[in-house]
Amino acid sequence: MTDGLYGAAELSALVREESVLDGAFECLRRIWSHQDALASENLNAEYRTRSLEHHLHRQEPKLYDELKSAMGDHPITDLDTGCGVIMDALSLREGFQLLHDLPEEHGWDVTLEWAGVERLPSETQFICREWFDAHSPSAVSREDYRFIGDLDVPQLPTTDPAFVWTRHPDRRLEESFKGHYSSEEMTDIYEDVKGLLSDIVVESVHEEFLVTSDHGYANVHDTNPYVLSESDAEALKSKFSGRFREVENGFAFDQLRESGVIKRVGGHYVVRGYYTPTTPGASKRVRHGGMSLPECMTPVLRITT
C-alpha cells in the first residue's frame, strides 16, 4: 500500500528513471510543493516523507547504496561563473517552496534539481574541508568568498565566480528545535531564509546563481515508521549520541549493522533513515550526520535574474 505517497506521474518516474532517487525526488516534489507544507500545525508532510523513505526501501533494498553512490562531485565544485550560494542545512523542503515563490515575487527564472551531499557523514565541518579546505565556513579566507552569520548581507565578492556561505537556516533550526516544542514556526524561519537569499541576489553583481546546501536535515518529531526493537534501541542509545560516529569494533555495532539501523561509510558509522534512540524526555527534533533522503539529497536551485 502506498497510502497516497505518489500518484501516476511519480510512479512513472520511479519505474522509468535510471535511479530510484530521481523518482523519489518527484515524490518529494508532490509532498513539499503545497503552499502550507512547512506550517508547524501540518505534520502531514514530515510524516509522509518518513513513510515514503520507509516504503521505498522496502520496495528497493538498494536505496541507501544508491544514495551513498550519489555523493560527491557536487555541482558547486564545477562552478566557473556567477555566484554560488551555500545555505547551511537548506533542504528540499525549502527548495520546492523557493522554486514557487522566487519567480512569483521577483520575476526570476528558477529551476530546481537535486545533488547528493559531497560526502558522508553529512556534517558541515567535513564538507567545508572538501570544498574550501577549512574546518568551518567562518574560517575560510579567500577573495572570492564571503561568510554570512546572520540576516544582514555584507559587501559581496565581485569575482567570477563568487561564493557565499550563510549560517541560515541551520542556525535558526538549531536554536528553535532543541526539544519537542519550538518557540518559532517553520514558516517564519523559511520567510527569513527566503528574504536573506533574495537580498543576496539583489546585492550581488552577478546575474546567475547556483543555490544549494552542505546538507539537509532529518526531522524526527512525531509519528515514525522506523521502529526499533528493545535490543536495538538500547544499543543505539548506548553507542550513538548523534547520528554518526567513528567506526569501532563491538557486538552492539555488529548488531545495529545487521539490523540495518546503521551503515558504514569510510571510517564512520551513520544512522540510516529515521531511526533514533528512545531517550526519555525532550530530544532534538532536527538532526544531521546520518543518511536519509531529505538530509542527503541537497537542493540545487539555478536562478537567472
Image: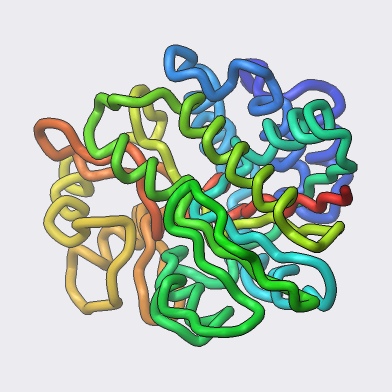
Residue 12, percent from left and from top: 87, 34
Residue 50, percent from left and from top: 49, 33
Quarter location, residue 11 = top right
Extreme-front residue of the structure: 155
Residue 249, percent from left and from top: 21, 78
Extreme-top residue of the structure: 41
Q: How is the image coloured?
A: rainbow
Residue shown at 48%/80% (left/top)?
140
Quarter location, residue 91 = top right
Is 38 located above or below residue 267 in the figure? Answer: above
Q: Out of 124 and 61, give the one closest to the viewer.
A: 124
The quadrant of the rendering that contains the N terminus is top right
Residue 34, percent from left and from top: 68, 19
Is 288 located above or below residue 283 in the figure? Answer: below
Q: Position of 67 compared to 247: left or right? A: right
Q: Position of 58 compared to 277: left or right? A: right
Q: Count how many numbered circles sit on residues in the image.
A: 0
Q: Position of 215 compared to 297: left or right? A: left
Residue shown at 29%/58% (left/top)?
256
Is 45 located above or below residue 252 in the figure? Answer: above
Q: Out of 9 and 81, give the one closest to the viewer.
A: 81
Whether residue 89 is visible to the viewer of this picture, yes or no, is yes
Whether residue 260 is visible to the viewer of this picture, yes or no, is no
Residue shown at 52%/35% (left/top)?
192
Residue shown at 60%/38% (left/top)?
195
